[in-house]
Image (tube, rainbow, N blue to C red):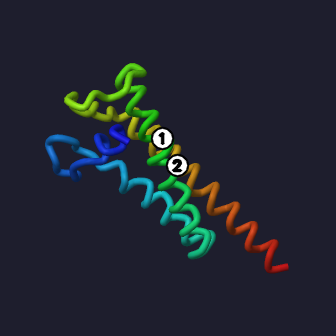
Amino acid sequence: MRAVRALTTGFADSTVQPWLPGLPHAVAALATWFVFGGPACVTGLLMATLASFVVYLPLTALALNRGEGLAEDAPAPLLPLRAKLALFALWTVTAWGAAALSAAAMAVAAE
């Protein structure tokens, strides 16, 4: 939990953490609205949010801290551009995959 709090504090103009990981996964998920519709978009957003805060951000924090947990008094590691791009790719794949599965399930249920 410390990793999630450490990587999600601050806003885009903050000098402490110049990037808020919570916003790009929402943008990636909301892009599915135009292809799959509202309910599938919400499913994609929920899955991307869950995967982000349960899996992606804690693993990113561990990787940036050389596999060790973050100490209470240690500053949070800054995310380099490659980590941001990798996280955005993971969020996009998760959101679009969940939205596609949800849309397919709704289509099958409608038949």
Q: Residue at x 58, y 49 (%)?
A: 93
How far apart are the alpha carbons under marks 1 and 2? 6 Å
Label 2 Cα crowd, 10 Å radius (few <14 / some 14-19 / many 20+):
some
Q: In the orientation shown, which residue stands out farthest toward the top?
A: 66
Write the residue at 44% across / 54% down.
25
Give coordinates of residue 73: x percent, y percent. 20, 30
Q: Is residue 28 left or right of residue 106?
A: left
User: Hey, which quadrant is residue 76 in on the image?
Assistant: top left
Q: Which residue is mark 2?
A: 51
Expressed as whole percent of the image width and height from the top left, the position of residue 57 reads: 42, 41
Q: First in sequence: mark 1 or mark 2?
A: 2
**Element at label 1:** helix
Q: Please, what is the three-letter code of the amino acid marked with disc 1?
A: Tyr
Q: Residue furthest front?
A: 72
Q: Which residue is mark 1?
A: 56
The picture quadrant where one finds residue 110 is bottom right
Q: Residues within 10 Å of mark 1 (few under 14, many from 20)?
A: some
Percent x, y of residue 102: 68, 66
Dots 1 and 2: beta carbons under 8 Å? yes
> In the shown orientation, is residue 59 left or right of residue 6?
right
Instruction: Pick out the residue farthest to the bottom.
Output: 110
The residue sitting at 35% across, 38% down in the picture is 3
In the rendered image, the residue lying farthest to the left is 15
Please tell me whether mark 2 sits on a helix, a strand or a loop.
Answer: helix
Q: Amino acid at mark 2?
A: Ala
